[in-house]
Amino acid sequence: MEKEKQNNREQWLKAFVDRKEDFDYEAFCEMMRSPGNEDLREEFDRLRRLSVLGADKTKIWEQVQSRMNKNSRYRVKRYLKYAAVIVAFVLAGGTWWMVKENSGDVSKSSVTTALAPGIPKAYILFSEGQRMDLTVTERDTTIVEKGMQVRVDSSGKVSYIPVDPGSTQGEKIVYNTIVVPRGGEYKLELADGTLVWLNSDSELRYPVKFIGNQREVQLKGEGYFKVSKNPEKPFRVMVGDMVVKVLGTSFNINAYKDQDNILTTLVSGKVDIQDMTGESLVVMKPNQQVDFRHGQVAVKEVDVARFVSWIDGKFYFNDMTLENIMSQLQRWYDIEVFFTDEKLKSYPFTGVIRRDLTAERIFEIIEKTTQVKFHIKDKCVTVNHR
């Protein structure tokens, strides 16, 4: 049976690599976005990063086989089918080569519904498994969680207020997690007064009350922190294999899973970038950015406005490649983006654009200064040559 499965894998791979099967990218996109297929999108994102292996089909396929053998989340037949689709995508350089000739331009006739911008949207996972959907929770709502009042104020901001601000001696640290999906953003105030802005497709794990001699949270995705000063309790952000240690400052961390580096941008104050052993790698100064990659750091001076403009409702694209731009838009508008040609990814664009515009409007702006055209079908966007 196992040998038969392996043969099926190879047959699927060969069919896609040889382009013998006429698959529609829109159908693939719809499949990825179907309820219950979040793991498929996650696997697609992971395999897309393997494109750095170029045309080495053997290495890519070996990694797929390894995960398929170890991973029991999928039913075998479904996984074989999806993995083959994804691998073909990666081997084609992350582009889709079956785009229809009549894909067309961005137009009202090609758009079923407007691609609306993100909104304040998130949910909290409490320590005992309960889930609080902040998108539908009424404003000025307060609930009690492990000795803390969790309050959603009139603006939608979440804050934690001690029920009994007395001694914390002997208490156990209780964690909550706030999850911001694609197409969302949210603002959170931690128990110590630290403010955190979370961008789309991000999450933060944090104590409902800080106990002991330090404050520690864990970030995935992108977050902007304005840390409340407390010299006796340093604030630490754990992100991947890196630690950001601060006393009181403002900074942005960009650590999305579809990239292999972590960008930390310091607005004010001073932060210490450390590895997981606590060893200091570099102490940052305002207007500096640290690029942490595979345990190594690179420091440079930057215009911080470019990297924190999102909390003020703006996209700041400064000679940015279309690939990086679409990566941001993909999260904010909850869309899937496919390039018909690898060369399109490197096209540059410069501009400051409001985040409250529809995606269609942003595509129109980009089209005016670049030789590209966008075709939209529901939540799938194809980037073409003009």
Image (cartoon, rainbow, N blue to C red):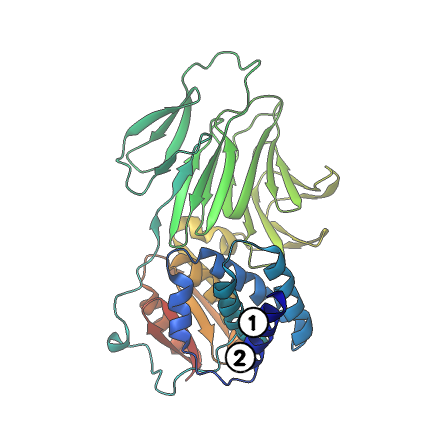
Instruction: Please give the residue where the numbered disc 1 appears in the rendered image.
Output: 87
Looking at this view, is 121 or 62 the one in front? 62
Where, quadrant-wise, is the C terminus in this rendering?
bottom left
Q: CA distance from mark 1 to mark 2?
A: 8 Å
Where residue 371 appears, as percent x and y from the top left, is 44, 82
Q: Residue furthest front?
A: 1
Q: Earlier in the sequence, mark 1 or mark 2?
A: 2
The 10 Å Cα crowd at callout 1, few under 14, some 14 to 19, many 20 or more, is many
The 10 Å Cα crowd at callout 2, few under 14, some 14 to 19, many 20 or more, is many
Amino acid at the residue labelled 2: Phe
> Is 112 situated above or below 142?
below
Where residue 378 sits, quadrant-wise, is bottom left
Where residue 200 appears, as percent x and y from the top left, is 43, 52
> Is 294 situated above or below 346?
above
Instruction: Please give the residue where the numbered disc 2 appears in the rendered image.
Output: 16
Say which residue appears at 56% left-offset and 22% top-offset: 211
